[in-house]
Image: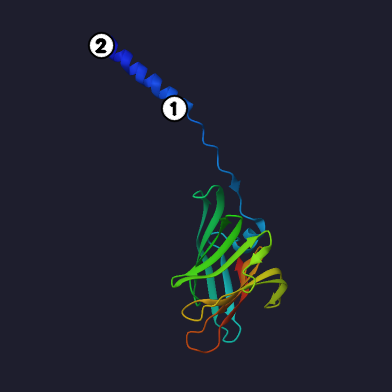
Amino acid sequence: MKSLNYILLLIIVAMCCIGSCRKPIPPKPFFPLDEEMRAYFAVPDSGSWYVYQDSASGVFDTMRVKNRRDHIIGNLPYLGEGYSLFYTCTQSPNFRTDVSTQDDGYTFSLSYSIGGAHRISKDSSGFSPREKVKILDSLVVEGVKYESVIQSADNFNYGQAYRKLWFSKGVGIVKKQAISNQGGYDAVFNLINYQIE
């Protein structure tokens, strides 16, 4: 019995020695989300709401943040910060947005049930793609002047989708141009009221 205990003790000591000889894995560096990206694209929390009005028909569209998920991206050589927001709308299409740290910059994407659409990246040279992203000093919507606005255009020409979106720092989407399904005019929904949680 003593020899069995002695053998078990030797195995335990050997395993501890082998385990202690391994080099510790250095922690991954953490890259937080760029504050400018957060200010444009990750503003609202669950329960936030926005009310828009179609400038031509007068129809109202209420957009709510149904859910917001904050997460850490760990499948890269570093840890990155990310946010996913799920929006429901009464008139225009429901959608999801994702904003996160990616490689040497940051990305924002907006997607619908029919697929992905608006995608904006930011790195040390600024926002891109340059042919789809415009930076405006300000934009007046329903008599309210919003400073520092990003206009995003996309090539979607079918289904429930947005042709253009305008984002204001600290507010989120202040204007939406929806694609017409009947071949008529594109409805332009202007922000008239909102509450950010």
Residue type at the position of mark 1: Gly
Q: Is residue 161 left or right of residue 152?
A: left
Q: Which label lies toward us, 2 or 1?
A: 1
Count neighbours of disc 1 (C-alpha within 10 A) and say few if under 14, some if 14 to 19, many if 20 or more: few
Q: Colour scheme in the image?
A: rainbow
Instruction: Describe the element under mark 2 as helix, strand or loop.
Output: loop
With 172 as the anchor, is 180 left or right in this view? left
Residue neighbourhood size for the residue with mark 2, other residues' Cα within 10 Å, grouped as few (<14), some (14–19), many (≥20): few
Q: Position of residue 138 (x, y in %)?
A: 72, 72
Extreme residue toward the bottom, this view: 184
Q: Nearer the viewer, residue 23 or 107?
A: 23
Q: Nearer the viewer, residue 151 or 127?
A: 127
Q: Residue furthest right?
A: 137
Residue drawn at 55 percent across, 82 percent down: 59
Question: Which labelled disc corresponds to residue 90?
Answer: none
Q: Where, quadrant-wise, is the N terminus in this rendering?
A: top left
Task: Identify residue for label 2.
Answer: 1
Residue at 49% in and 50% down: 75
| Of 188 and 2, the residue lying toward us | 2
Q: How far apart, in angstroms, are the residues tagged by discs 2 and 1? A: 27 Å
Residue 141 relative to residue 11: left or right: right
Q: Secondary structure at mark 1?
A: helix
Q: Is residue 177 left or right of residue 111?
A: right
Residue 34 visible in the shown view = yes
> The residue under label 2 is which amino acid type?
Met
From the image, tell me which residue sits under label 1. Answer: 19
User: Looking at the picture, how far across and down is residue 117, in whole percent?
Assistant: 52, 71
Looking at this view, name the residue that lies furthest to the left: 1
Reading the chain from its start, which is encountered first: label 2 or label 1? Answer: 2
* 111 is higher (above) or lower (below) than 80: below
